[in-house]
Image (cartoon, rainbow, N blue to C red):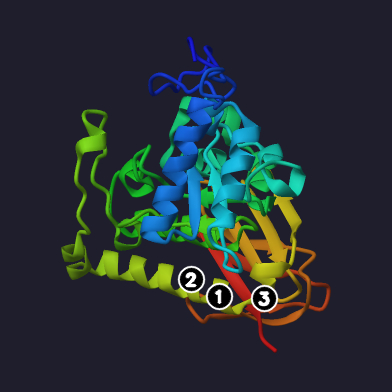
């Protein structure tokens, strides 16, 4: 392909294939033939059960994505196969639920939004740091959500320290990652508290071994246990697998948002630097006793479905209804 499919896009990694070009002498489309053989090789040799298409925006061809998805599934008959694409910013119409070619699309907005709120990254705050965007990133079931990836710095690195305040922010991020409707993804080492700088020099040649020695520190052990607890909940709680999200409390001034997944699970997130005391959350799904999933603290929702609680700065709470 001559030039770029999207010349105004800041992301570019070199020459792009022309999937439309057909060699009349050989009666083939060379780019389609080549990339089809690549997909077949990886699935056949390494028994992959899914594929991620990098830089789908630069591929700029839904038909080839649909073709490669079909090739992958044909090589794994009667077995699960999951296709996803990276497109910056994410697009719902890339996903099969909306007529697109793949199962899911990476959500760069999820990463950028939490980065703006929790790490004070103001470069795109006007675009991401608002309640409407929070509700958007929490709601789509066809997005792959992540706190960081191989393309950007880790959230803990951007937060800039490892103390009790940093742990509260990371706990908030983990709760939001696993209780959102989309598909949670963990970058290798994130669960251990890896915060090494990625940088921008020869990243593709860098080696990042698992930093197991981090578990010698209490901060990192607490972080790992939080990940394990939320992974377990995601597996056993049907509401997190099936039920839609319902936003029942929104306070833009104090940056507090509450949502439920089903009738028995509630998340309250506070994304502001000033702690709140005796704050009232109304319209709870049910009254009675609820239990904080992380701390096991019991709280009481009164007869008019109000919960009064204290919230630390940047704290999130995850409550399960006591049955």
**Which residue is outermost to the bottom?**
323
The one nearer the camera, 94 or 170, is 94
In depth, the one of 138 and 71 nearer the eye is: 71
Say whether marks 2 and 1 touch (CB < 8 Å).
yes
Q: Residue furthest right?
A: 304
| Residue 235, disc | 1
Tell whether 244 sits left or right of 234: right
Callout 2: SS: helix
Residue at the spot of label 3? 238
- Residue 270, can we see it? no
Q: Is 203 above or below relative to 181?
A: above
Instruction: Return the mark for residue 231.
Output: 2
Query: Which percent across, then down, holds residue 141?
Result: 67, 54
Structural crowding at the residue carrying mark 3, measured as other residues with C-alpha within 10 Å and reported as few (<14), some (14–19) or many (≥20): few
* 308 or 93: nearer the viewer: 93
Residue at (74%, 49%) from the top-left corner?
Answer: 97
């Amino acid at each position: 392909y001559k030039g770029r499919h999207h010349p105004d896009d800041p992301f570019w990694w070199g020459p792009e294939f022309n999937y439309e070009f057909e060699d009349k002498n050989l009666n083939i489309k060379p780019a389609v033939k080549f990339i089809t053989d690549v997909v077949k090789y990886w699935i056949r040799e390494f028994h992959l059960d899914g594929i991620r298409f990098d830089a789908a925006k630069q591929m700029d061809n839904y038909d080839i994505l649909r073709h490669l998805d079909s090739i992958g599934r044909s090589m794994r008959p009667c077995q699960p196969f999951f296709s996803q694409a990276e497109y910056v910013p994410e697009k719902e119409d890339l996903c099969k639920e909306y007529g697109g070619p793949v199962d899911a699309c990476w959500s760069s907005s999820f990463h950028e939004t939490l980065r703006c709120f929790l790490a004070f990254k103001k470069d795109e705050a006007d675009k991401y740091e608002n309640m409407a965007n929070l509700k958007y990133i929490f709601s789509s079931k066809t997005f792959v959500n992540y706190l960081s990836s191989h393309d950007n710095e880790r959230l803990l690195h951007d937060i800039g320290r490892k103390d009790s305040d940093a742990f509260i922010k990371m706990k908030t991020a983990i709760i939001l990652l696993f209780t959102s409707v989309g598909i949670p993804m963990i970058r290798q080492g994130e669960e251990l508290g890896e915060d090494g700088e990625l940088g921008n020099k020869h990243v593709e040649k860098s080696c990042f071994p698992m930093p197991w020695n981090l578990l010698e520190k209490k901060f990192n052990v607490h972080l790992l246990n939080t990940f394990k607890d939320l992974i377990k909940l995601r597996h056993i709680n049907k509401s997190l697998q099936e039920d839609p999200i319902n936003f029942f409390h929104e306070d833009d001034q104090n940056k507090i948002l509450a949502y439920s997944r089903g009738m028995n699970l509630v998340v309250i997130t506070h994304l502001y630097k000033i702690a709140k005391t005796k704050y009232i959350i109304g319209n709870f799904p049910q009254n009675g006793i609820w239990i904080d999933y992380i701390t096991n603290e019991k709280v009481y929702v009164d007869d008019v479905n109000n919960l009064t609680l204290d919230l630390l700065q940047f704290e999130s709470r995850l409550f399960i209804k006591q049955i």
